[in-house]
Structures are given as structure tokens and as C-alpha cells.
Amino acid sequence: MFDRCLYFNVNALARRVNKKWNEAFRTLELSPAHGYMLRAVLAMPGIAQKRLARELQLEKSTVTRFVDALSDRGLVVRRRLDDAREQGIFPTPEAEKMQDSLEQLGEQLYEEMIDRIGRKQLVSLVSQIRQAAEKLE
């Protein structure tokens, strides 16, 4: 019935992906969104919120809320950068202890998707989704 409907099919896929990712990240007591944000901060200590928003394709207000939540959990801190108008987001030692687990979880999910979808198909699907998102910007 909705074979040609982008909205329906993207959302159906998103629901299945969200369920899988939520279950996986629950083991670390994080949502997937918080987990990916923490991975970005760990990979780029001192990242500015503006860049973090761009990297994660999120609104700045959403990034602020997520950083606040991670800060409340003691996983990140904000510190002024050289340009006193901007703050950088830095991981705490507690977050650094989680880094290997976060990376392993990401790799595990990636490998599971390869097993289910196929490597070429997964790479192509992700590429097509990213391109479509850019075109709809």
C-alpha cells in the first residue's frame, strides 16, 4: 500500500533501528543519542557545541540538553576555549573508562547490520540516506 511512500518507509526503518540501538545502549545506561554524542566528545575532546551539533546533525538546543544530561551524569564538562566566547566539551575520566565499551558496541551493531543486510547494501543504504538528507536540507 505504501511502497512508494518515503515517509512511511523511513519511519518503519527508524522504528526497527531505534529498538535495536535502544536495547544495545541500555547495557551502558545511555540512550543511543547520548552514546553517540559521548563518542564524538571522546574522539574530539574540547569540541565546541556548534561543531558537535553539525557532526551529529542536531539542533543546537538539542545538543545543549544532551550535554547538560551527560554533564549531570559526570561524563562531560564544559570549559572555556581560547576564544572566551565559546566553550568546549571535554570527557571526564568516568567517560574515558567507557570509551572502549562504546566503541565495541558501535562495532558490534555495525557487524550485526552487515550480517543482516550485507556489507555492500549497508554501505550503499547509509550513503543514500545521507545524500537524501543533504538534498532535503
Image (tube, rainbow, N blue to C red):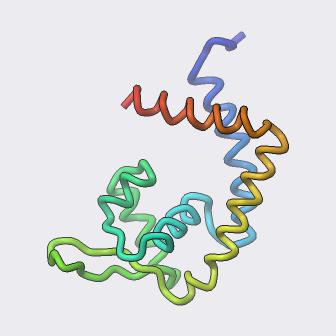
Q: Residue at x 40, y 64 (%)?
A: 65
Q: Position of residue 104 (x, y in %)?
A: 72, 68
Q: Residue at x 45, y 53 (%)?
A: 56
Q: Position of residue 67 (x, y in %)?
A: 42, 70
Q: Nearer the viewer, residue 48 or 44?
A: 44
Q: Residue 94, located in which quarter of the rendered image?
A: bottom right
**Seen in the image, is 81 located left or right of residue 40?**
left
Name the residue at the left extreme: 84
Name the residue at the right extreme: 115
Q: Position of residue 29 (x, y in %)?
A: 67, 72
The quarter in which the C terminus is drawn is top left
Name the residue at the bottom extreme: 93
**Seen in the image, is 12 located left or right of residue 85?**
right
The quarter in which the N terminus is drawn is top right
**Image position of 53 with respect to 101: above or below:** above
Name the residue at the front extreme: 120
Q: Nearer the viewer, residue 128 or 2?
A: 128
Q: Residue 60, located in which quarter of the rendered image?
A: bottom left
Q: Residue at x 15, y 72 (%)?
A: 85
**Image position of 81 with respect to 135: above or below:** below
Q: Residue at x 64, y 32 (%)?
A: 124
Number of disc labels = 0
